[in-house]
Each structure stands twice: as C-alpha cells, then as structure tokens.
Image (cartoon, rainbow, N blue to C red):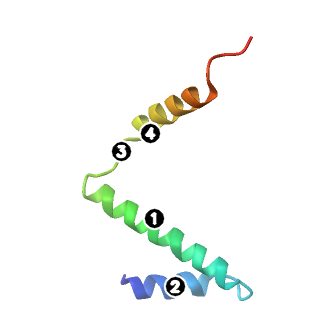
Amino acid sequence: MTDRQLILETVQEMPEQASMSEILDELALVSSVKKGLAEIKEGKGIAHEQVVREFNSWITELSGPPKH
C-alpha cells in the first residue's frame, strides 16, 4: 500500500465529524507505527525485555530512594 493509499484509507475510516486536529493526530500515529515497523524489519528494534528493564530503571531513578 502506498503512503497516499494509507492516508486516504485512514481518513475514510474516521468519523465524519472528526476535526482536522484529530485527523492529523491519527495520521501522525499511523506514520509513527509504519516507521517503527520498518525499523523492526531492518533489525533496528529493541527487544521487549530490554525496554522493560530500561523503563524500570528510569522509574527507579526518578522515584529516588525508598521512603520509610
């Protein structure tokens, strides 16, 4: 599917009363997902387990030492 076809299909699937802002947000989301899937195909993705480890590390770092 071409980018143009994907855009048209995405817009056509949205409610008639969708605002321009909502349409643009949806197109940005679709574009990001498409880019991410292409990166995974190219072997550029990060394993889910690694993401979980990094996320947990950030949460621990941001929350500081345990409070008693």
Label 1, label 2: how far apart the Cα atoms are: 15 Å
Tally the numbered discs: 4
Dot 1 alpha-carbon crowd within 10 angstroms: few under 14, some 14 to 19, many 20 or more: few
Q: Position of residue 15 (x, y in %)?
A: 70, 83
Residue beneath disc 1: 33
**Number of the label disc, if any, that sits on residue 46:** 3
The amino acid sitting under disc 4 is Val
Q: Are marks 3 and 4 in contact (CB under 8 Å)?
A: yes
Q: Are marks 1 and 2 in contact (CB under 8 Å)?
A: no
Element type where label 1 sits in the image = helix
Q: Is residue 8 above or below residue 48?
A: below
Q: Nearer the viewer, mark 1 or mark 2?
A: 1
Dot 3 alpha-carbon crowd within 10 angstroms: few under 14, some 14 to 19, many 20 or more: few
Q: Is residue 45 above or below residue 64?
A: below
Residue beneath disc 4: 51
The amino acid sitting under disc 3 is Ile
Residue beneath disc 2: 9
Q: Nearer the viewer, mark 2 or mark 4?
A: 4
